[in-house]
Protein backbone atom coordinates (compact mmCIF):
# COMPACT_ATOMS: atom_id res chain seq x y z
CA UNK A 1 0.00 0.00 0.00
CA UNK A 2 1.23 3.54 -0.65
CA UNK A 3 2.83 5.46 2.19
CA UNK A 4 2.40 9.24 1.89
CA UNK A 5 3.65 11.53 4.64
CA UNK A 6 0.97 10.73 7.22
CA UNK A 7 0.37 7.07 6.32
CA UNK A 8 2.54 4.24 7.64
CA UNK A 9 2.83 0.46 7.53
CA UNK A 10 2.50 -1.04 10.99
CA UNK A 11 4.25 -4.11 12.39
CA UNK A 12 4.85 -5.76 15.73
CA UNK A 13 8.32 -4.20 15.79
CA UNK A 14 7.22 -0.59 15.25
CA UNK A 15 3.74 -0.65 16.82
CA UNK A 16 4.76 0.86 20.16
CA UNK A 17 6.74 3.71 18.61
CA UNK A 18 4.43 4.32 15.66
CA UNK A 19 1.09 4.01 17.45
CA UNK A 20 1.41 4.15 21.24
CA UNK A 21 4.14 6.80 21.48
CA UNK A 22 2.81 8.95 18.63
CA UNK A 23 -0.68 8.87 20.17
CA UNK A 24 0.69 11.03 22.98
CA UNK A 25 1.06 13.81 20.41
CA UNK A 26 -2.17 13.31 18.47
CA UNK A 27 -4.73 10.74 17.27
CA UNK A 28 -3.46 7.61 15.52
CA UNK A 29 -5.91 5.63 13.40
CA UNK A 30 -4.95 1.95 12.95
CA UNK A 31 -6.51 0.10 10.01
CA UNK A 32 -6.40 -3.67 10.63
CA UNK A 33 -6.78 -5.39 7.25
CA UNK A 34 -6.00 -8.48 5.18
CA UNK A 35 -5.73 -9.18 1.46
CA UNK A 36 -8.64 -11.65 1.52
CA UNK A 37 -11.09 -9.21 3.16
CA UNK A 38 -12.68 -7.27 0.28
CA UNK A 39 -14.13 -4.34 2.30
CA UNK A 40 -10.60 -3.51 3.50
CA UNK A 41 -9.65 -2.53 -0.06
CA UNK A 42 -12.67 -0.22 -0.30
CA UNK A 43 -11.99 1.36 3.08
CA UNK A 44 -8.28 2.11 2.80
CA UNK A 45 -8.58 4.69 -0.02
CA UNK A 46 -11.19 6.55 2.05
CA UNK A 47 -8.92 6.64 5.10
CA UNK A 48 -5.86 7.54 3.01
CA UNK A 49 -7.73 10.43 1.41
CA UNK A 50 -8.73 11.72 4.84
CA UNK A 51 -5.14 11.44 6.08
CA UNK A 52 -4.09 13.71 3.23
CA UNK A 53 -7.04 16.09 3.74
CA UNK A 54 -6.38 16.46 7.48
CA UNK A 55 -2.73 17.25 6.81
CA UNK A 56 -1.14 15.62 9.84
CA UNK A 57 -3.90 16.18 12.39
CA UNK A 58 -3.92 12.38 12.70
CA UNK A 59 -1.67 9.51 11.59
CA UNK A 60 -2.97 6.52 9.66
CA UNK A 61 -1.29 3.18 10.33
CA UNK A 62 -2.13 0.21 8.11
CA UNK A 63 -1.51 -3.19 9.72
CA UNK A 64 -1.77 -6.44 7.76
CA UNK A 65 -3.24 -9.04 10.13
CA UNK A 66 -2.05 -11.95 7.97
CA UNK A 67 1.52 -10.83 8.57
CA UNK A 68 1.11 -9.48 12.11
CA UNK A 69 -1.72 -11.52 13.53
CA UNK A 70 -0.30 -11.42 17.04
CA UNK A 71 -0.77 -7.64 17.16
CA UNK A 72 -4.38 -8.01 16.02
CA UNK A 73 -5.02 -10.62 18.69
CA UNK A 74 -3.50 -8.43 21.39
CA UNK A 75 -5.99 -5.72 20.48
CA UNK A 76 -9.00 -8.06 20.29
CA UNK A 77 -9.47 -7.71 16.52
CA UNK A 78 -11.89 -10.45 15.49
CA UNK A 79 -13.31 -9.11 12.21
CA UNK A 80 -11.98 -7.17 9.24
CA UNK A 81 -11.73 -4.40 8.55
CA UNK A 82 -11.43 -3.04 12.08
CA UNK A 83 -10.22 0.49 12.76
CA UNK A 84 -9.06 1.66 16.19
CA UNK A 85 -8.28 5.24 17.15
CA UNK A 86 -5.51 5.59 19.75
CA UNK A 87 -4.88 8.64 21.92
CA UNK A 88 -2.46 8.81 24.86
CA UNK A 89 -1.81 5.10 24.51
CA UNK A 90 -5.46 4.14 24.81
CA UNK A 91 -8.08 3.00 22.32
CA UNK A 92 -10.80 5.66 22.25
CA UNK A 93 -12.82 4.42 19.28
CA UNK A 94 -13.31 1.06 17.57
CA UNK A 95 -15.17 0.78 14.28
CA UNK A 96 -15.95 -2.49 12.52
CA UNK A 97 -16.57 -2.79 8.80
CA UNK A 98 -16.78 -0.30 5.98
CA UNK A 99 -18.22 3.15 6.80
CA UNK A 100 -18.78 6.08 4.44
CA UNK A 101 -16.44 9.06 4.44
CA UNK A 102 -18.87 11.30 6.33
CA UNK A 103 -18.89 8.95 9.32
CA UNK A 104 -15.10 8.95 9.45
CA UNK A 105 -14.99 12.75 9.28
CA UNK A 106 -17.37 12.99 12.22
CA UNK A 107 -15.24 10.56 14.22
CA UNK A 108 -12.00 12.36 13.40
CA UNK A 109 -13.47 15.78 14.11
CA UNK A 110 -14.29 14.61 17.63
CA UNK A 111 -10.61 13.93 18.26
CA UNK A 112 -8.76 16.55 16.19
CA UNK A 113 -10.33 19.67 17.67
CA UNK A 114 -12.59 20.31 14.70
CA UNK A 115 -16.11 21.51 15.38
CA UNK A 116 -15.71 21.73 19.18
CA UNK A 117 -18.54 23.61 20.88
CA UNK A 118 -16.92 26.56 22.75
CA UNK A 119 -19.33 25.97 25.64
CA UNK A 120 -17.39 22.79 26.44
CA UNK A 121 -14.33 24.83 27.36
CA UNK A 122 -16.49 27.32 29.26
CA UNK A 123 -18.19 24.55 31.23
CA UNK A 124 -14.83 23.08 32.18
CA UNK A 125 -13.53 26.53 33.16
CA UNK A 126 -16.49 27.06 35.49
CA UNK A 127 -16.09 23.59 37.00
CA UNK A 128 -12.36 23.94 37.60
CA UNK A 129 -12.89 27.45 38.97
CA UNK A 130 -15.09 26.15 41.76
CA UNK A 131 -18.46 26.85 40.12
CA UNK A 132 -19.21 23.15 39.99
CA UNK A 133 -22.98 23.21 39.56
CA UNK A 134 -22.82 25.97 36.95
CA UNK A 135 -20.18 24.09 34.96
CA UNK A 136 -22.06 20.81 35.09
CA UNK A 137 -25.33 22.51 34.09
CA UNK A 138 -23.69 24.13 31.05
CA UNK A 139 -22.14 20.82 29.98
CA UNK A 140 -25.51 19.10 30.38
CA UNK A 141 -27.09 21.69 28.08
CA UNK A 142 -24.34 21.24 25.49
CA UNK A 143 -24.86 17.47 25.65
CA UNK A 144 -28.55 17.94 24.91
CA UNK A 145 -27.84 20.34 22.04
CA UNK A 146 -25.18 18.15 20.37
CA UNK A 147 -26.25 14.52 20.87
CA UNK A 148 -23.95 13.35 18.07
CA UNK A 149 -20.82 14.49 19.95
CA UNK A 150 -20.01 11.86 22.58
CA UNK A 151 -17.15 13.94 24.01
CA UNK A 152 -19.63 16.09 25.93
CA UNK A 153 -21.53 13.38 27.86
CA UNK A 154 -18.28 11.49 28.36
CA UNK A 155 -16.67 14.57 29.92
CA UNK A 156 -19.79 15.29 31.96
CA UNK A 157 -20.00 11.66 33.10
CA UNK A 158 -16.41 11.72 34.36
CA UNK A 159 -17.00 14.93 36.27
CA UNK A 160 -20.15 13.52 37.86
CA UNK A 161 -18.17 10.45 38.94
CA UNK A 162 -15.51 12.73 40.44
CA UNK A 163 -18.29 14.44 42.41
CA UNK A 164 -19.59 11.10 43.66
CA UNK A 165 -22.83 11.52 41.73
CA UNK A 166 -22.69 7.96 40.46
CA UNK A 167 -26.36 7.43 39.68
CA UNK A 168 -26.53 10.62 37.59
CA UNK A 169 -23.42 9.54 35.66
CA UNK A 170 -24.86 6.07 35.13
CA UNK A 171 -28.17 7.43 33.87
CA UNK A 172 -26.38 9.82 31.51
CA UNK A 173 -24.02 7.28 29.96
CA UNK A 174 -26.42 4.35 29.74
CA UNK A 175 -28.85 6.68 27.95
CA UNK A 176 -26.40 7.22 25.08
CA UNK A 177 -27.16 5.61 21.69
CA UNK A 178 -25.83 2.09 21.20
CA UNK A 179 -23.23 3.35 18.71
CA UNK A 180 -21.82 5.71 21.32
CA UNK A 181 -21.82 3.08 24.07
CA UNK A 182 -19.88 0.75 21.77
CA UNK A 183 -16.96 3.21 21.72
CA UNK A 184 -14.06 1.89 23.78
CA UNK A 185 -13.63 5.00 25.93
CA UNK A 186 -17.32 5.16 26.84
CA UNK A 187 -17.26 1.44 27.61
CA UNK A 188 -14.27 1.86 29.92
CA UNK A 189 -15.97 4.67 31.86
CA UNK A 190 -19.17 2.63 32.16
CA UNK A 191 -17.21 -0.38 33.44
CA UNK A 192 -15.36 1.77 35.97
CA UNK A 193 -18.63 3.34 37.04
CA UNK A 194 -20.17 -0.10 37.51
CA UNK A 195 -17.28 -1.04 39.80
CA UNK A 196 -17.83 2.09 41.91
CA UNK A 197 -21.58 1.48 42.19
CA UNK A 198 -20.99 -2.17 43.05
CA UNK A 199 -18.40 -1.31 45.72
CA UNK A 200 -20.74 1.28 47.20
CA UNK A 201 -23.46 -1.31 47.87
CA UNK A 202 -21.26 -4.39 48.42
CA UNK A 203 -21.27 -6.44 51.63
CA UNK A 204 -18.08 -6.56 53.69
CA UNK A 205 -14.98 -8.22 52.27
CA UNK A 206 -15.24 -10.87 55.01
CA UNK A 207 -18.81 -11.66 53.94
CA UNK A 208 -17.80 -12.03 50.31
CA UNK A 209 -14.78 -14.20 51.10
CA UNK A 210 -17.01 -16.45 53.20
CA UNK A 211 -19.48 -16.74 50.29
CA UNK A 212 -16.71 -17.83 47.96
CA UNK A 213 -15.44 -20.36 50.49
CA UNK A 214 -18.90 -21.94 50.41
CA UNK A 215 -19.32 -21.59 46.64
CA UNK A 216 -16.32 -20.71 44.42
CA UNK A 217 -18.74 -20.28 41.49
CA UNK A 218 -20.50 -17.33 43.18
CA UNK A 219 -19.57 -14.83 40.44
CA UNK A 220 -21.55 -11.98 41.99
CA UNK A 221 -19.32 -12.26 45.06
CA UNK A 222 -16.21 -12.35 42.88
CA UNK A 223 -17.34 -9.27 40.97
CA UNK A 224 -18.03 -7.40 44.22
CA UNK A 225 -14.57 -8.37 45.53
CA UNK A 226 -13.04 -7.07 42.30
CA UNK A 227 -14.90 -3.78 42.77
CA UNK A 228 -13.71 -3.43 46.38
CA UNK A 229 -10.14 -4.19 45.30
CA UNK A 230 -10.26 -1.62 42.53
CA UNK A 231 -11.45 1.25 44.74
CA UNK A 232 -8.52 0.41 47.04
CA UNK A 233 -6.13 0.55 44.05
CA UNK A 234 -5.44 -3.19 44.38
CA UNK A 235 -5.32 -3.72 40.62
CA UNK A 236 -3.75 -7.16 40.87
CA UNK A 237 -6.51 -8.34 43.20
CA UNK A 238 -9.24 -6.88 41.00
CA UNK A 239 -7.80 -8.40 37.82
CA UNK A 240 -7.40 -11.78 39.52
CA UNK A 241 -11.09 -11.94 40.41
CA UNK A 242 -12.19 -10.73 36.98
CA UNK A 243 -9.96 -13.29 35.25
CA UNK A 244 -11.60 -16.01 37.35
CA UNK A 245 -14.99 -14.75 36.16
CA UNK A 246 -13.84 -14.87 32.52
CA UNK A 247 -12.54 -18.40 33.00
CA UNK A 248 -15.74 -19.63 34.68
CA UNK A 249 -18.36 -17.79 32.60
CA UNK A 250 -17.37 -15.26 29.95
CA UNK A 251 -21.05 -14.34 29.47
CA UNK A 252 -21.56 -13.26 33.11
CA UNK A 253 -23.35 -9.87 33.12
CA UNK A 254 -22.90 -9.51 29.37
CA UNK A 255 -19.15 -10.03 29.53
CA UNK A 256 -18.50 -7.93 32.65
CA UNK A 257 -15.33 -9.87 33.42
CA UNK A 258 -13.65 -9.07 30.11
CA UNK A 259 -15.01 -5.51 30.01
CA UNK A 260 -13.80 -4.91 33.53
CA UNK A 261 -10.32 -6.17 32.72
CA UNK A 262 -10.10 -3.98 29.62
CA UNK A 263 -11.21 -0.95 31.68
CA UNK A 264 -8.47 -1.60 34.23
CA UNK A 265 -5.91 -2.06 31.45
CA UNK A 266 -6.95 1.37 30.12
CA UNK A 267 -6.71 2.85 33.62
CA UNK A 268 -3.14 1.53 33.80
CA UNK A 269 -2.25 3.04 30.43
CA UNK A 270 -2.44 -0.30 28.57
CA UNK A 271 1.16 -1.06 29.47
CA UNK A 272 3.32 -2.50 32.21
CA UNK A 273 4.04 -5.97 33.60
CA UNK A 274 0.63 -6.33 35.26
CA UNK A 275 -1.26 -5.44 32.07
CA UNK A 276 0.87 -7.69 29.87
CA UNK A 277 0.51 -10.65 32.26
CA UNK A 278 -3.24 -10.38 32.63
CA UNK A 279 -3.81 -9.58 28.96
CA UNK A 280 -2.08 -12.83 28.04
CA UNK A 281 -4.10 -14.76 30.64
CA UNK A 282 -7.35 -13.22 29.43
CA UNK A 283 -6.53 -14.01 25.81
CA UNK A 284 -5.77 -17.61 26.76
CA UNK A 285 -9.06 -17.87 28.68
CA UNK A 286 -11.06 -16.47 25.76
CA UNK A 287 -9.38 -18.50 23.03
Image: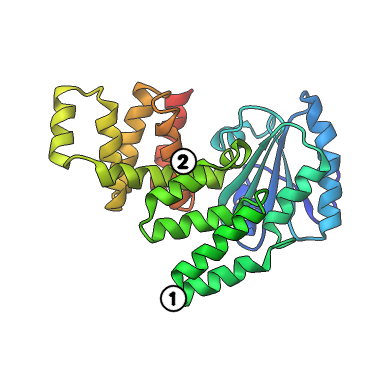
Residue 153 in the image: above or below residue 67: below
| Count of all numbered marks drawn on residues in the image | 2
Residue 142 in the figure: left or right of residue 249: right
- Residue at the image point whose x is 61% and y is 34% from the top: 72
Extreme residue toward the bottom, this view? 129
Q: Position of residue 121 (x, y in %)?
A: 61, 69
Residue 253 in the image: above or below residue 91: above
- Residue at the image point whose x is 43% and y is 51% from the top: 168
Q: Identify the residue position indicated by label 2 in the image.
A: 262
Q: Secondary structure at mark 1?
A: loop
- Label 2, residues with CA under 10 Å away: few <14, some 14-19, many ≥20: many
Foreground residue among 114 and 168: 168
Q: Give the CA distance from mark 1 to mark 2.
A: 33 Å
Foreground residue among 240 and 249: 249
Instruction: Tell which circle, 1 or 2, labels the residue nearer the N-terminal end.
Output: 1
Q: Secondary structure at mark 2?
A: helix
Note whether residue 228 is visible: no
Q: Quadrant of residue 26?
A: bottom right
Q: Position of residue 138 (x, y in %)?
A: 56, 65
Q: Position of residue 51 (x, y in %)?
A: 81, 52
- Label 1, residues with CA under 10 Å away: few <14, some 14-19, many ≥20: few
| Mark 1 or mark 2, whichever is nearer to me | 1
Residue 25 in the image: above or below residue 75: below
Residue 101 in the figure: left or right of residue 284: right
Q: Identify the residue position indicated by label 1 in the image.
A: 130
Q: Quadrant of residue 5?
A: bottom right
Amino acid sequence: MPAPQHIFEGSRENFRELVIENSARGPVLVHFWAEWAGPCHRLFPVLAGLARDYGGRFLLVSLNTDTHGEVAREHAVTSLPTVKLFRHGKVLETVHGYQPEGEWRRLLDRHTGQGVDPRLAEGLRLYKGGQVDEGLSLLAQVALDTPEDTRIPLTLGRLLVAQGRLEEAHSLLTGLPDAAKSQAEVGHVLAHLDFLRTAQSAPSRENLVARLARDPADLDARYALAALALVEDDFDGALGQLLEIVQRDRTFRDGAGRRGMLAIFALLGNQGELVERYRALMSSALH
